[in-house]
Image: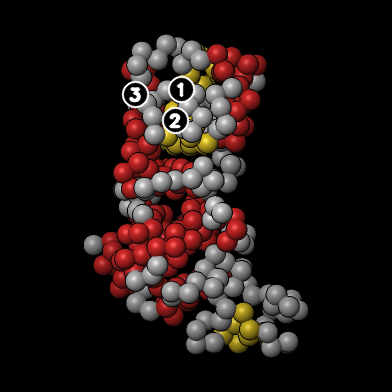
Amino acid sequence: QELLEFAERFQTDTDCKNYLSEIKWEKGFACTKCGNATYQERKDHSRTCNKCSHTESSTAGTLFHKVKFGVRKAFFICFEMSMTTKSLSALQMGKRYGITEKTARLFMHKVREAMKSSKSHPMNGDVHVDEFVQGGKVGRSYGSKKKKTACAVELTPEGKVKRLYSLKIEDFSSDSLKTLFEQHISKDAKVTTDEWRGYRPLAIEYDITQVPSKNGSNFKALHTMIHQVKSGIRTTYSWVSAFNIDRYYDEFCYRVNRSQSKETIFNKIIRRMVKADKVYQSELICT
């Protein structure tokens, strides 16, 4: 039903461009060339400055800029990536929308770029932290080719997952683990970890309690999320580079953290796509 309603609302590229223009200029128009505030709106919802005649499209300066396969298809990809309960591959999206796998992957990375956390709302309350290796068992492994990751969940009073963040780390040292804390965990949080020694130096700045893992039984909600993150990547993608692994984590966390607000999740990702800084292809593709 949600997909049918979405398709009915956005029937053409022009419908999508109108939606983008409403978001882009919600605080008023200002010509990017001369700063003038008056304009003429075109049929495609671009705006032409009344003073210098510069015309700006609704996609200019957004992550939809120069989308070669049409804004409507781009909207559908955004919708699917934000609403799905399972990860989507570029191969799937390419076949579905009649574009190449490479083109689909590049645009999907742009969406993932918009999905990354602002880091302005650190987790508070009851927070559990652990680490894992992508492609291995839950816990620590020092295999050089394994992608090492730190993961944290904020729990509700009932012990359910409220928020989740995952981050690639270089190793399991205190210095590496500290990055997750600095980016996503408030110093007022009550943090629980297992007895790994790498957390001990962090207890100087953070309220950390260390308890035995008991094969994950003391961290059930966290280990459930770790399993979902690992299996989602392993079963969807044939290979994920260390260069882009955080983008896939950002996508997964974005959906989990907004799973209770499905009615606004699409609007939020489009707003982020409009407001995001420009991203160059070299920043998205590992060469």
Q: Residue at x 36, y 65 (%)?
A: 94
Disc assigned to residue 140: 1
Q: Secondary structure at mark 1?
A: loop
Q: Nearer the viewer, residue 31 or 158?
A: 31
Disc assigned to residue 255: none
Of the residues shown, which amino acid type is indicated by label 2?
Answer: Val
* Left or right of 188 on screen, residue 235: left
Q: Which residue is mark 3?
A: 220
Instruction: Using the rendered view, name the quadrant where residue 58 is placed.
Output: bottom right
* Left or right of 52 on screen, residue 55: left
* Left or right of 36 on screen, residue 112: left
Residue 229 in percent (x, y) is at: 38, 38
Q: Dot 2, how many residues are within 10 Å of its Cα: few (below 14), some (14-19), or many (20+)?
A: many
Of the residues shown, which amino acid type is indicated by label 1?
Answer: Arg
Q: Secondary structure at mark 3?
A: helix
Quarter occupied by the C terminus:
bottom right
Q: For the view shown, which residue lies furthest in the left direction?
A: 1
Q: For the view shown, which residue lies furthest in the right direction?
A: 34
Instruction: Calculate the distance from the C-alpha at mark 2 to the C-alpha at mark 1.
Output: 7 Å
Residue 269 in percent (x, y) is at: 47, 57
Q: Tell me if label 2 and label 1 are in contact, CB under 8 Å.
A: yes
- Residue 264 appears anywhere in the view: no
Q: Residue at x 58, y 42 (%)?
A: 119
Of the residues shown, which amino acid type is indicated by label 3?
Answer: Lys
